Amino acid sequence: LKLAHSAIYPVAANWKLALENYLECYHCMPAHKEYSRSHSLKDPASMTEDLLGSMRLQSVEAGLPTGELRASGHGAVDIGADVFYRRYPLYPGYVTGSQDGRALAPLLGDLACYDGGATDVQIGPLNHLLAYSDHVVGYRFGPVALQRTDIQILWLVRDDAEEGRDYDIGRLTWLWDVTTQEDEQIIHNNQQGINSMYFRPGPLSEMETAVLSFYQSYLAMIS
């Protein structure tokens, strides 16, 4: 891979709120209409066996694994050593995370074809990747102050891809630039709510299992 583009999004909130927002997709359907057009993670009920089966078949054809790994929270091998990957389908008509569903860059590595899915990867508590067949989006959460976090996003493509010939920066970065700008406002609003004297914690939804794993890891670290 090579770095095609990077950007920093400063958020007026504590780093834990920025990370929580990234880890759950309970908010995706109402908050991210662009993302929700293509990514089935926004609605687990939409991951029908037909959609999952199609992705698995395409994954085998492309040369990708079809399973899932989770070693986070209580299951991590050591404190802070959370690792995770999970694949989920894109909706029909989308081969990657693009605005129009079409390819954004050359296929990565030795992939034989587009597989119809996306892969979430976690390495430790603050480093996350979203891998498509033709590019990878990296998220790094950098605590700056009590209520300031820098979200750094890295867009990676195949190391021999050339800008202007094989990929266009505007098309490549469009989805996660739009989505992160929306998240900035959500995270900031969460911080303002927590700062209120009326704040009371609420329950997690069934779609927020990764947030619960993060809580377990963080409580283990500070204990």
Image: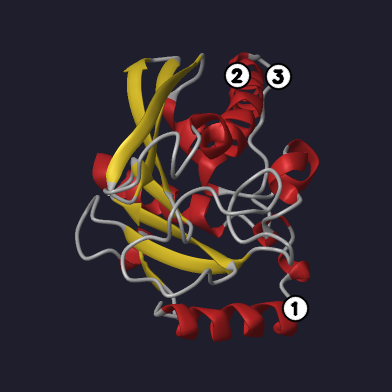
**Answer yes or no: do the residues labelled 3 and 2 have beta carbons within 8 Å?**
no
Disc 2 + disc 1, Cβ < 8 Å? no
> Which residue is identified by label 2?
188
Mark 3 residue element: loop
Rounded to the nearest angstrom, the CA distance separating label 3 from label 1 is: 41 Å
Q: Earlier in the sequence, mark 3 or mark 2?
A: 2
Question: Could you say which disc has been placed on residue 48 in the image?
Answer: 1
Quadrant placement of the C terminus = top left
Under mark 1, the amino acid is Thr
Q: Amino acid at mark 2?
A: His
Position of residue 138 relative to residue 115, above or below, is above
Count of marks placed on residues = 3
Q: Nearer the viewer, mark 2 or mark 1?
A: 1
Residue under numbered circle 3: 198
Vertical arrangement, residue 80 with respect to residue 119, above or below:
above
Q: Secondary structure at mark 2?
A: helix
Left or right position of 132 against 126: right
Give how far apart the Cα atoms at labels 2 and 1 are: 34 Å
Answer left or right for 52 relative to 37: left
Q: Give the mark nearest the N terminus, 3 or 1.
A: 1
x, y (%) of residue 63? 39, 80
Visible residue check, residue 27: no
